[in-house]
Amino acid sequence: MCGIAGVIDPQSSDLGVDLARMLQRLVHRGPDGEGRHIEPERSVALGMRRLSIIDLEGGWQPIWNEDNTICVVFNGEIYNYVELREELRRGGHRFRTQSDTEVLVHLYEEFGEQMTSRLRGMFAFCILDKRSGSLFLARDHFGQKPLYFTRSGNRFAFASELKALLMLPWVDRELDKDAFLDFVAWLSLPPPRTHFRSIRKLSAGSSMRISLAEPACEPHRYWRYGLEAEPDLTDIDSAVAELDRTLTESVAVHLRADVPVGVLLSGGLDSRAVLAFAQARQGGKAKSFSVGFGADDSELIGAARTARELGSEHHELELRADDFANSFDRVVSLLDEPIGDPACFALLRLCEFARGHVKVLLSGEGSDEILAGYEGRYAGMMTTMSRSRSIRLLAPILPTPAVHASASRWERLLHRAGSSPATEAVQLRIEGLPGDIRKPRVMNHEQLAALRQRMVSLGETVFRSQRDELSSLLVLDVEWQLAESLLQKADKMSMGASMELRTPILDIEVAKVAARIPSGLKLRAGGPGKYVLRKLLAKKLGDPLDRPKLGFPVPLRQWFVGPLRDRIEDELLSSNSFVSGRLGNARLRAAWQDFIAGWDGGRLFYSLWSYEKWQRSLQAPVRAAA
């Protein structure tokens, strides 16, 4: 587990200094040491910061093949590295270490770019191929590990975090002003967009080859999650059996480490499942960690109950408003870009707390997106989309909706009648979020009209029809919400605490099984989501666990109208704030008064406050490495 960076720059006077500045911004990702490879004659430099997890003594990077023509810098874990190493060794490859990293160079020798099809893990890596004079970069199937890149003429750079790229003087820091509207509407940006015009994210399941002589950026999608094929696990017993088999195997390989491993435990179903499988594998010796916000916190109560039932060594952390205030600037800095999820704070503090006991944590992330856990949202979206199919038949005789995109129910119906299913799915993702066009408290007519055009554009690029409506919604969430919000939060907060966070439910083999299960066994009509997972746990533990999904419910209202109110009003609602200038101070203050009076707008103001802090952080001077 590391932070990686690299640069191609024929104009640089000192590639070593450029690389050092980038790596200095990644120290938190790898506090255990650093590795570099610099070739001035090829104008290329690669480096990494290491968090030692596997082969603590021998796994230092860059790692080379036998004749020193191929090397790799790597962020992540390859969980099937033991099996791959034995296969490659039988094929004649010679290994110098016991690390998972070394598998990558030999896989590349054997399979070239097709190597990604053999990997079971989370990863972002760069391979330098001296023979072809090129770099090969790849990001894992679901996007658990981030990878940013930028190009200007014959210069190219990549890094695990965007802030490292900003250390290069030639990187354009101009903001993509239109991205602000996407953020307010959806709380994260769809790939490959970032808030900087010149910087992109490599999308999940993508790779690209970069010539050292002419560094053009042309990403290639080597894998996409899809639910087009008809499912074959159509009865509940066979679905439960296959899910049981793959989860058992996945947790076993996710526990591979040369350092202590624990489990991130909430009061819900997913982490309960992970802990149950980990306990079975470790013989009842698992450590579990949970966070809450007071003695009556239902998440702490539920997590403690699960820990008692499963017999883990349990540790709890309670947080208060002053903890939030003291951590907020650090959260914003670690994220690189704003993400409107207040659980970032809780996850960072819990990882920092757990770091005193373990160096790796397992979490239940990904279950909701591949097994349909957001039952209320999915059921509501499918009901609306079903109605829309009938309305579209009347579209030729209905009047044209107003250009100004009124929020009235009649105007929304007219827009829906003329929208494609793809545009509608993207629009429905907004509902319940700050940009909800049904209650546009902070957007003016021009912004709402622009947002409607943006929904059409996004529908064409991020939505793919699958075998049924639920499957289409799951794939949309996997590629956008999961990859660019939830997994970014998980990576940036855990690595900010120099902690590795692994997600065994989001294993590629588990996902393949999930793809074979029909929608009716994931989300039952009128019933809870993740039905097949509930049945599996009921079989293993005798308890389906019907507690509602909460995550880490930060008490935003209690804190924002209480101890943090003055700070928010000073920083966010002032007439000279960036957010106030974009949305209008009067409109923003009116929404704030609605919130004070009882409107459930805590997540809106968390998101806008985090964006404001991020904007201010861009103006702060950055200390370069010596």
Image (spheres, rainbow, N blue to C red):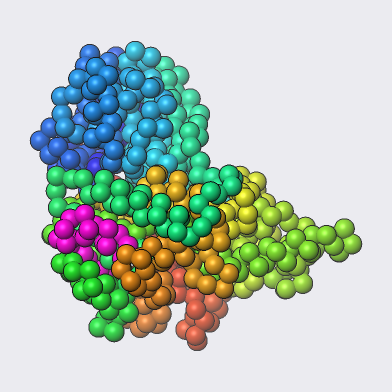
Q: Is residue 152 magenta?
A: no
> Where, by quadrant of the figure, is residue 89 drawn?
top left
- Left or right: 384 in relation to 80: right
Q: Is residue 281 magenta?
A: yes
Q: Quadrant of the N terminus?
A: top left
Instruction: Please report the residue visible at 15 percent of the width from the left and 29 percent of the height from the top.
Output: 97
- Where residue 563 sits in the image (x, y, percent)? 32, 81
- Residue 245 appears in the picture as rendered: yes
Q: Nearer the viewer, residue 209 or 34?
A: 209
Q: Nearer the viewer, residue 372 or 125?
A: 372
Q: Residue furthest right?
A: 397
Q: Quadrant of the C terminus?
A: top left
Q: Residue furthest left?
A: 57
Q: Which residues are magenta?
A: 272-291
- Left or right: 380 in relation to 493: right
Count of numbered circles on the image: 0
Relative to 335, residue 584 above or below: below
- Where residue 61 sits in the image (x, y, percent)? 20, 31
Relative to 225, residue 47 above or below: above
- Where residue 257 sits in the image (x, y, percent)? 18, 45
Instruction: Please report the residue visible at 17 percent of the width from the left and 55 percent of the height from the top.
Output: 282
- Residue 323 appears in the picture as rendered: no
- Where residue 479 sits in the image (x, y, percent)? 50, 49
- Left or right: 281 in relation to 302: left
